[in-house]
């Protein structure tokens, strides 16, 4: 960047760090970063890679200006309910939600859940959380379930339970992940 005349304190470098932070986050499976997550992510990138000649304390006002510029240029989308998105990921997520919403037709999976849960827990020696039980209950009543959560919150276990429930009911199913 310096060879192209972009100085170490140039605002475009901070803008680039913000976009890089979102891209790095997307590589880890996140479609957006919460507004409170992006500043620490960018500060870490700036510090680790010496991207900008700013200290952590100096970075925040410059960061906010860069963020406003990116949003104004539509290089980022700010969703007040979620956070900051790369435009393509925002549109993909919204289109996916629209498609899923069209599938939201009630259906009933014929599985008696209490004995099913008891047998699953006995066979796997895993105690299911209320949220995991609720996910299975939700999918027995609807055709679509969007399962989200932080690492270690039990998403994979919930999916295993759902697969077993579908197999027990002899129902064809498909799983989708980003």
Image (cartoon, rainbow, N blue to C red):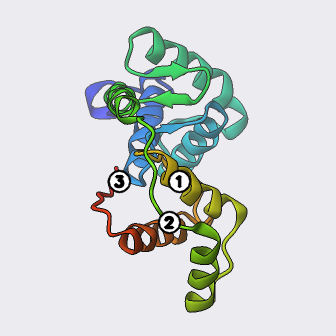
What distance separates the C-alpha of mark 1 from that of mark 3?
A: 31 Å
Q: Are marks 1 and 3 in contact (CB under 8 Å)?
A: no
Which quarter of the picture shows residue 112? bottom right
Q: Is residue 165 above or below residue 61?
A: below
Say few, some or many: other residues with alpha carbon within 10 Å of mark 2 (under 14 / 14 to 19 / 20 or more). Answer: some
At 40% from the left edge and 45% from the top edge, which residue is drawn?
143
> What number is the disc on residue 109?
none
Q: Are marks 3 and 2 in contact (CB under 8 Å)?
A: no
Residue that label 2 marks:
111
What distance separates the C-alpha of mark 1 from that of mark 2?
A: 52 Å
Q: Is residue 162 above or below residue 32?
A: below
> In the image, residue 79 lies at what x, y percent?
54, 21
> In the image, residue 50 lies at what x, y percent?
50, 46
> In the image, residue 24 lies at what x, y percent?
41, 48
At 43% from the left edge and 40% from the top edge, which residue is drawn?
31
What distance separates the C-alpha of mark 3 from that of mark 2?
A: 25 Å
Q: Are marks 1 and 2 in contact (CB under 8 Å)?
A: no
Residue that label 3 marks:
177
Viewer-nearest of discs 1 and 3: 3
The residue sitting at the top extreme is 72
């Amino acid at each position: 960047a310096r060879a192209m005349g972009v100085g170490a304190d140039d605002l475009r470098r901070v803008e680039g760090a913000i976009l890089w932070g979102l891209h790095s986050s997307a590589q880890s499976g996140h479609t957006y970063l919460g507004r409170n997550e992006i500043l620490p992510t960018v500060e870490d990138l700036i510090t680790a890679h010496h991207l900008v000649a700013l200290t952590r304390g100096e970075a925040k006002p410059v960061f906010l200006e860069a963020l406003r510029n990116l949003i104004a240029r539509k290089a980022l989308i700010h969703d007040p309910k979620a956070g900051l998105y790369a435009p393509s990921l925002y549109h993909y997520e919204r289109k996916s939600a629209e498609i899923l919403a069209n599938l939201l037709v009630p259906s009933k999976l014929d599985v008696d859940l209490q004995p099913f849960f008891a047998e699953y827990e006995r066979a796997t020696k895993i105690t299911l959380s209320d949220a995991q039980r609720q996910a299975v209950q939700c999918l027995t009543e609807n055709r679509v379930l969007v399962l989200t959560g932080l690492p270690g919150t039990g998403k994979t276990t919930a999916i295993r339970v759902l697969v077993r429930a579908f197999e027990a009911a002899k129902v064809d199913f498909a799983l989708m992940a980003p």
